[in-house]
Image: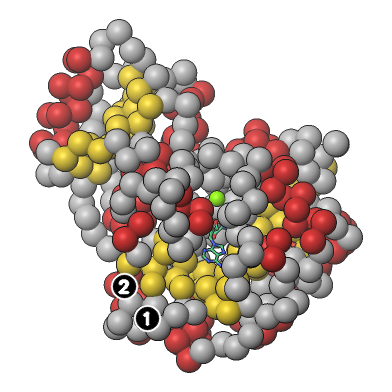
Amino acid sequence: METQIVKIDENNISEQDIERLGKIVADGGLVAFPTETVYGLGANAFDDKAVKSIYTAKGRPSDNPLIVHFADPEDIGMAVREVPESAKLLLSHFSPGPLTVILKKNNDISETVTAGLDTVAVRIPSGKTARALIRAAGVPIAAPSANLSGKPSPTTARHVIDDMNGRIDAIIDGKDCDVGVESTIIDLSGEAPVILRPGGVTYKQIKELLPNTVIDRHVLEAVSVKDQPKCPGMKYKHYAPNADVTVVEGDIERVREKIRELIRENKDKRVGVLTYGCDEYDADCIITSGTDNRSYAKNLFRELREFDENNIDMVFAEFAYDDDFGLAVKNRLYKSAGNNVIYV
Ligand code: TXA
Ligand code: MG
């Protein structure tokens, strides 16, 4: 399949281009598009055949449900049975933005989108291009991250082209993603709100509005295939570069000492370090992801791909400074490392 690559400047969106891309989605095609979190791979949420083709293009297991994207919070009624007060409150504060809420689905949303669950994930991205595309399509857009299943989520158009060129109808070549990790997912379909995936909206921010919010135990635990986490995506190995990743966590000075020791033990390998800004390592590739966890998150997926471009065999990733945004970083790092973590 020939994939069109269409440049879109979010501050000057070509009406003609976005209408054409919207029509591709409305007619059952697949279009990758930028959001503020990561790039998404979009299909008409009401077109079962189109939604199924997402799973094929990504190589994604079909028991992993998709998020349905809307241009405006008022539109989510198209997918859900009712909007509880808790959802109204969160959406009024954080939407459009990096938040996904899980609610009871209505009958217009098919089981292909929700992988057989009776709930649906809905999100209103704040990215201007994403919202313009949804409006142009005239339908909600079901979209996972636009990476091949198992690879780090794409945060630049280049990543999407690397993974999806030739597999889908079109790729929007837009700006790099600001948040850099996927949206926070919160399940509001049960008794208490449960965070299923940490992201751009933090636990602390949510707790201020909904004090009984809890974090699902799978967020930071190893998940075996036999296990049935509430968020099916959590049971798959994720965000993994080709290199073996080890997270070293704890006091930053001890973390750095430990990584230097690990580098000495692995002299025969090509070794990379992901750091908060320390260059005192005798490694083949040292990448600073950011100096705090918000910037670490923004760059993380891009850097994980960069180690592969440098043919690195082993990556040691610093993790420290467990601040408000740390949970999102920690969750992605643990997954990219297949839960291979050393505490110091
Ligand atoms: O930031 C984001 O959320 C990006 C952009 C493109 O919007 N999307 C994204 O989609 O990360 P994806 O498919 O890579 O991750 C969606 C996650 C999966 O782990 C899936 O299992 C979970 O959401 N999910 C979807 N529907 C669900 C539901 N009804 N109940 C529980 N988890 C659900
Ligand atoms: Mg994904």
Give the residue drawn at x 39%, y 68%: 195
Q: Is residue 105 left or right of residue 84?
A: right
The residue under label 1 is which amino acid type? Answer: Ala
Choose between 192 and 77: the one closer to the eye. 192
Q: Is residue 68 visible?
A: yes
> Pointer 2: what residue?
214
Query: Disc 1 on helix, strand or loop?
Result: loop
The residue under label 2 is which amino acid type? Answer: Val
Residue 72 percent coordinates (x, y): 65, 79
Crowd band around label 2 with a 10 angstrom C-alpha radius: few (<14), some (14–19), many (20+): some
Q: Is residue 321 left or right of residue 235?
A: left
Q: Earlier in the sequence, mark 1 or mark 2?
A: 1
> Pointer 1: what residue?
192
Give the residue drawn at x 66%, y 40%: 59
Q: CA distance from mark 1 to mark 2?
A: 7 Å
Q: Quadrant of residue 319?
A: top left
Q: Is the N terminus in the top left, top right, bottom left or bottom right quadrant? A: top right
Choose between 236 and 239: the one closer to the eye. 236
Tag of residue 339: none
Whether residues under marks 1 and 2 lie with C-beta atoms below 8 angstroms apart, the answer is yes
Residue 175 percent coordinates (x, y): 61, 51
